[in-house]
Amino acid sequence: MTIRKTASDYSRSHEPIVWGLFSAGGVIVAFFIPALILLTSLLVQVGIADEAVLSFDRVQSFAQAWWGKLFILAVIALSLYHTVHRIHHGLHDVHIHIPDSLAIIIFYGGATVLSCLVFVWLLAIGW
Amino acid sequence: MSTSEKTIYRKPYVQNQSASWWLKNKFYIWYMVREGTAIFVFLYALILMLGLLRLAQGEAAWNAWVASLSNPAYIVFHGIALIAAMYHVHTFFKMFPKVIVIRFGNWKMPESYLIAGQWVGFVVCTAVILGIGLFVGV
């Protein structure tokens, strides 16, 4: 087998951009996600915290504040970029090979679409 | 052919590797566990997104979403997701000193200081989020 390559076959890597989002997401996941899992999904449900913690009025007023919106968008969007990057490379590790151009659309495109949805829903919640 | 184009003729050697290569060694298994934690965090992010949508849809939708989280299957999932997230924390903090080296003159900050510093940051962040989340305005 002989492979013929020309200079135009070598393109700039997208890796620095996605690695930046991946790292920022890694920080967000490390510092915020464990506390958030406890807060949204465990402490109230197992009866340690009061149900009022997750009351509609309280969470709505949090999501209506600009800093609340920023927090929600940053946590969800960066967690998505971080995790799709790992899942993308993890699939490669277990020998599920998706062509790079398609993988970029599926994983990073998918994370971008989902982040846009978060943005739209945050606007829908109002101020 | 223009000068910017080079023709490369090569016969790549392709080493056969089985898809279960990572099961053969403890180090590789833990590597895959670390990568696997992303699946749980990804699913949790989707659950948060669903909650945000329900919040936008109004009080009845939100209350139904909160009630659904009490389903035992959800509680078990979030328990596993918490463990997965904590393993991510452990590995992420251990990785940081390999990426960032802090020097003052000839003195290089030991990795253990940087790891300990991040854990202090983790405790503070967690305490602030839980403090505000559980107590402010409840």
Image: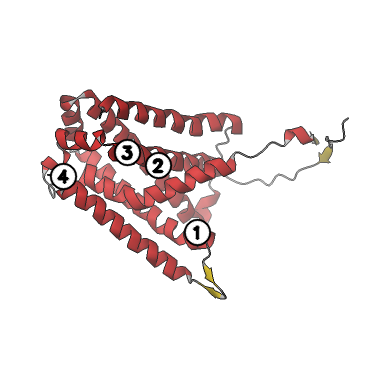
Q: Which of marks 4 and 3 is nearer the N terminus?
A: 4
Tell whether A31 sits left or right of B10: left
Label 1: state its secondary structure: helix
In front of the other: A22 or A102: A22
CA gap between label 4 and label 1 equals 37 Å
- Mark 1: give few (<14), some (14-19) or many (20+) Cα within 10 Å: few
Can residue B43 be seen here? The reply is no
CA gap between label 2 and label 1 equals 25 Å
Residue ID at (37%, 40%)? A74
Is circle 4 on the same chain as circle 2? yes
Label 4: state its secondary structure: loop
The disc label shown at residue A72, or none:
3
Q: Which of marks 4 and 2 is nearer the N terminus?
A: 4
Give the residue type that dot 3 points to.
Ile
The disc label shown at residue B27, or none:
1
Is circle 2 on the same chain as circle 1? no
Q: Name the residue under label 2.
A: A79
Residue ID at (24%, 39%)? B74
The reply to whether dot 2 and dot 3 touch (C-beta < 8 Å) is: no
Q: Nearer the viewer, mark 2 or mark 3?
A: 3
CA gap between label 2 and label 3 equals 11 Å
Give the residue type that dot 1 points to.
Phe
Q: Nearer the viewer, mark 4 or mark 1?
A: 4
Give the residue type that dot 2 points to.
Ser
In front of the other: B44 or B112: B112
